Image: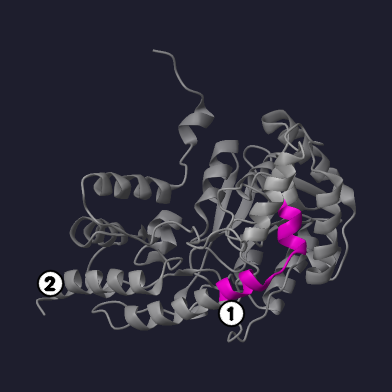
Amino acid sequence: MKQLSDAANRLEGQKMFQILAKAQELERQGKKIIHFEIGDPDFDTPVNIIEAACRALKNGDTHYSNSSGIFEYKKVAAEVTERSRGFKPDIDQILVTAGGNVQIYYGVACAVNPGEEVIIPDPSFVSYNSILKFVGAKPVKIPLYEKNEFRMNPADVERAISERTRMIIINSPHNPTGSVMSEDEIREIYDIAEKHDVYLMSDEVYTRMIYEDSDTKFSSPSKYDKCKERTLVVHAFSKSYAMTGWRLGAVTGPAEIISKMGLLLETTSSCVSPFIQKAGIEALTGSQEPINRMVEEFRNRRDIIVEELNKLPGVRCLKPKGAFYVFPNITETGLTSKEFADLMLEKAGVALCPGNYFGEHGEGYVRLCYATPIEVIMEGIDRIRKVLEGLAGI
């Protein structure tokens, strides 16, 4: 039998999709499942964006485009960056991609050699670890602690730096915990990257989802070097614009590495469909009111799910300041993260993610995505409550 490559055998994928597949199999068997496992907004893509894509299709925007992205889209992306982050990147600093995951892969593949180190949070978005292992890089994990609201501690990052460090990855707002780093913390980590002359990748996919009642505001390390020296900003439309299925995003960074990432994109997928990019232009330039309403609804859902989780026996939950995830502590139930998740899927019909899927420091927690209507959230929490009360003999 032919052998697979070593790299192929290191692939892990995204386990939440594997949970989704199991949940869908139960649904095919007739069981009603409450879905908290996947970070997919339940809102439809705003109509103006859909109409822009339809117009582009009818106008013949169905051919190859410039592999790095059409000029009109990159021009608008630069203008939005100027408004949101205080600087206007050059056109050759922007690469249009099919979503955010590939931006992480392209950036790591073009900046890090096998055996070199990349500092990441733990817990963290599962693709970081999977991508690093695939390319042969070594993930160096910085524990995130509940007592620090799951924010990455710059002092821990400094201690983790070695002569083999090539990149630091930060994520704020954070998946899976919803934490938001302070401006001072982000500045300190940028200074560490500058001091040691390493790349700093800032995953900013959830930047539109920082809640107004939070005492923390959005901050990006990109404002310190204008993405000209070391900062790479990962950004996509999936979450903020309810466009998960469209697969569209743009990464901004130093022109030299963006050029190489562009060649990798050109090699692997040629280009992003031009009609999808036209939809992206409309998303950025059209009315933001539907997006604002969506974020406000997520805030309402956050408040409700946190309140209800904290009523459950053996469960406590911090109120996240961003994204659309909660990361409750379930240690007092006596169950491991996976035992808790398996039990809820099998006995309650509730699909959620074990915290240890996001890293070893996620053990003792589970992740729930509240991108689902309030009545569904309430039903899901009620199902969990009945199972937990049964365990406790209540």
Magenta range is 279-295
**Marks 1 and 2 in Cβ contact (< 8 Å):** no
Query: In what quadrant of the picture does the C terminus appear?
Result: bottom left
Q: Residue at x 25, y 74 (%)?
A: 382
The residue tagged with tag 1: helix, strand or loop?
Answer: loop
Q: Is residue 315 left or right of residue 62?
A: left
Find residue 170 and report its horizontal and vertical position in percent. Answer: 64, 62
Q: Residue at x 80, y 64 (%)?
A: 80
**Amino acid type of disc 1?**
Tyr
Q: Residue at x 67, y 59 (%)?
A: 48
Q: Does residue 236 appear in this view?
A: no
The answer to whether 4 is drawn above or below residue 160 in the figure is above
The answer to whether 289 is drawn above or below residue 141 in the figure is below
Query: In what quadrant of the picture does the N terminus appear?
Result: top left
How far is mark 1 from mark 2, CA to CA?
35 Å
**Residue 246 shows which numbered tag?**
none
Q: Is residue 112 left or right of residue 21?
A: right
Q: Residue at x 82, y 68 (%)?
A: 223
The crowd level at tag 2 (other Cα within 10 Å; few <14, some 14-19, many 20+) is: few
Q: Is residue 52 left or right of residue 174?
A: right
Residue bearing the label numbered 2:
390
Residue bearing the label numbered 1:
211
How would you classify the magenta stretch by its main secondary structure?
helix
Q: Find residue 285 and report its image quarter.
A: bottom right
Does the magenta run of residues contain 294?
yes
Q: Does residue 336 appear in this view?
A: yes
Q: Is residue 219 left or right of residue 378?
A: right
**Amino acid type of disc 2?**
Gly
The residue tagged with tag 2: helix, strand or loop?
Answer: helix
Of circles 1 and 2, which is in front?
1
Find residue 87 and report its horizontal and vertical position in percent. Answer: 87, 66
The answer to whether 287 is drawn above or below residue 8 in the figure is below
